[in-house]
Structure formats: C-alpha cells, structure tokens
Image (cartoon, rainbow, N blue to C red):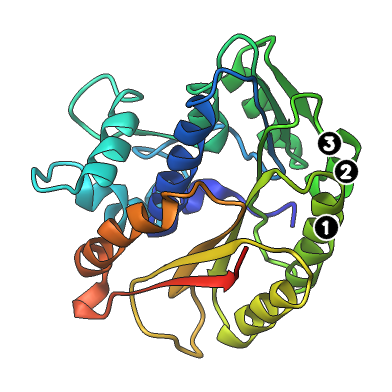
C-alpha cells in the first residue's frame, strides 16, 4: 500500500467523476449556514503536477481532464468542474491538478473543519505543505480507515466522509465496508462517498452485495467506464457509492454521465451506471 502514488493517475477519468460528485456534495453542504465537517481517509499529497514526474509516465490525465480542458460544449456540471480546476492553473495550459484535500479546502468557511489522513511518509509532507497550516484543517500521518472512528460523530453533526483507498490490497474491499458500517453507526446522518475501481468485476459485485446487506439505507451508485470489463490488467471503470446523497445528485449526474461516457470512452466503448443500491 505504501508504494501507491496517486500522481500516476491524477486527473484521469476516475478523478473526473469522483471530483464532480465531490463538488456537488460540498455545494450542497454549503447551502445551509450551519457548519460542517469533512474527513478524507486517503488524502494523498493534496495537489499534482501534470507536466512532470509520475503523471507523465502513463499520461492518464489526457483521457480525463485533458479531454475536457479546451471544449466549449461542456454540460453545466462538467463546465463547473473544469472551471474549478482552471483556478489552480496560472495559464490556459493544463499543468496542475488539485487532489480532494484542496478541492474541499476551497469550500470551507471559517466555521467548517477538514480532517486529512495520509499514511505515505513522502505524501504526508507534501500534504502538510499543500494545506499550508490552515487552522481549519488537521493533518494526520495515519491510516484513515483505522483511525477515523475516533472523530465520529463530529461536533457539527453535519458533514461528509470521503473514502478513497488504493485497493492495491484485495482485503481493502472488505475493510471499506466493515469501516463504513462502523462509521455509519456513529454518524448515521453523514454523507459518505466511497470511491471504487473496476479491475475485476467479481470484487465489485461482492462490494455492492455487502452494502445491500449492511442495513445502511439511502445508497446510490454512479459508475463511469471507458471500456468493457476485461480479465486483463488495468482499471476499466470506476465509481462512487454515496450514502445519504444530496437529493438532487442522481438527477444532476444523470445529465452528465452519458455525455462523459461518450467523450471519455475509448473507441466508443464508454459506459455508465446510475443505480439506487438501497432505498431510503
């Protein structure tokens, strides 16, 4: 797990969907004047250079944010996301990409809080520098899944928990569900955003079944694929499972997922899913 570096994948098609949904959730939280708390269990370094280092090895961003960067026909929610990313770039050239910590930071008001967990010894130093000693943000050099329960329920009784492990270890698929169930018991009204990759579909079916059998209510799934499932190595799709989503989220994502599947799909093989895993 400690060998994983998200920089290889920053700005790819998975980040596009994940961060569009993240922005939607944060916009919803800000609609009320009451403070909120956010927790990111696998924060990474906070921001990424797309014009150097790891990102250039596979250039995954080219089939993600790169394909959207200069288009003038973006659906509203996609345009909102792209314009948000442009704020982190000093020119019209795409060279920087914010991770979820810096995306969340942009939505924090003085009374809101953000807790960030990162275990990687190099990434934690970069993360601390990226958030720049913001008094609203606390950074932990620790495993988020093992330590997050101590923060729940937050004093604000409103908020979002982003769960975004690498899934390099197969046991992560079971661990995220076990932890999600425990978190939900402590903070049942929180919004939980669980990211998942599709590398071997059988694992995802097990994940979805476990959520359906967990007793957790009000769960929606949003998935974007760039090619059909395969037994070959590599991620063909990814998605977000959202517990207690904003009431408009499904309708908003329905407006853009078919478009994203068409634009980002490889050789016309893009696909998407929008499902209610568990009703309210």
Question: Is residue 112 placed above or below 262 in the rendered structure?
Answer: above
Q: Earlier in the sequence, mark 3 or mark 1?
A: 3
Asked whether 48 or 160 is in front, the reply is 160
Residue linked to disc 1: 179
Local crowd at mark 2 within 10 Å, few (<14), some, or many (≥20)?
Answer: some
Name the quarter where the C terminus is drawn.
bottom right
Question: Is residue 43 placed above or below 140 in the rendered structure?
Answer: below
SS at mark 2? helix
Local crowd at mark 3 within 10 Å, few (<14), some, or many (≥20)?
Answer: some
Asked whether 122 or 99 is in front, the reply is 99
The answer to which image quadrant residue 111 occupies is top right
Task: Kindly check if marks 3 and 1 are in contact, taking CB atoms under 8 A apart as contact.
Answer: no
Left-right relation of 18 to 279: left
Q: Earlier in the sequence, mark 1 or mark 2?
A: 2
Q: Nearer the viewer, mark 2 or mark 3?
A: 3
The answer to which image quadrant residue 226 occupies is bottom left
What's the CA distance linking mark 3 and mark 1? 14 Å
Label drawn at residue 149: 2
Residue 46: give x, y in percent of width and height.
56, 32
Residue 169: give x, y in percent of width and height.
74, 68
Asked whether 107 or 175 is in front, the reply is 107
The answer to which image quadrant residue 158 occupies is top right
SS at mark 3? loop
Is residue 47 in view? Answer: no
Question: Is residue 81 placed above or below 102 in the rendered structure?
Answer: below
Q: Residue furthest right?
A: 150
Residue 14: give x, y in percent of width and height.
44, 58
Q: Please give the name of the residue rendered at 25% of the width and 74% of the height, measured from the top-left corner.
A: 266
Label drawn at residue 254: none
Left-right relation of 86 to 268: right
Residue linked to disc 3: 153
Q: Please give the name of the residue rendered at 47% of the width and 26% of the height, measured from the top-left corner.
A: 31
């Amino acid at each position: 797990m400690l060998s994983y570096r998200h920089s290889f994948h920053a700005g790819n098609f998975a980040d596009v969907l994940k961060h569009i949904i993240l922005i939607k959730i944060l916009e919803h939280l800000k609609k009320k004047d009451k403070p909120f708390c956010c927790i990111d269990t696998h924060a990474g370094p906070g921001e990424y250079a797309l014009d150097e280092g790891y990102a250039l090895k596979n250039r995954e961003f080219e089939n993600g944010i790169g394909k959207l960067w200069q288009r003038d026909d973006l659906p509203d929610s996609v345009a909102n996301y792209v314009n948000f990313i442009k704020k982190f770039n000093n020119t019209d050239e795409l060279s920087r990409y914010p991770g979820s910590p810096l995306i969340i930071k942009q939505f924090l008001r003085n009374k809101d809080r953000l807790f960030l967990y990162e275990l990687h010894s190099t990434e934690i130093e970069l993360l601390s520098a990226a958030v720049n000693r913001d008094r609203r943000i606390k950074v932990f050099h620790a495993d988020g899944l093992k330590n997050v329960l101590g923060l729940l329920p937050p004093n604000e009784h409103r908020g979002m928990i982003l769960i975004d492990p690498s899934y390099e270890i197969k046991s992560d698929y079971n661990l995220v569900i076990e932890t999600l169930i425990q978190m939900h018991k402590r903070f049942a009204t929180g919004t939980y955003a669980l990211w998942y990759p599709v590398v071997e579909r059988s694992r995802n079916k097990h994940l979805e079944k476990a959520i359906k059998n967990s007793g957790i209510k009000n769960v929606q799934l949003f998935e974007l694929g760039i090619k059909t499932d395969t037994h070959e190595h590599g991620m063909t799709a990814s998605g977000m499972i959202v517990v207690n989503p904003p009431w408009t989220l499904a309708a908003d994502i329905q407006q853009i997922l078919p478009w994203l599947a068409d634009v980002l799909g490889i050789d016309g093989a893009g696909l998407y899913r929008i499902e209610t895993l568990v009703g309210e």
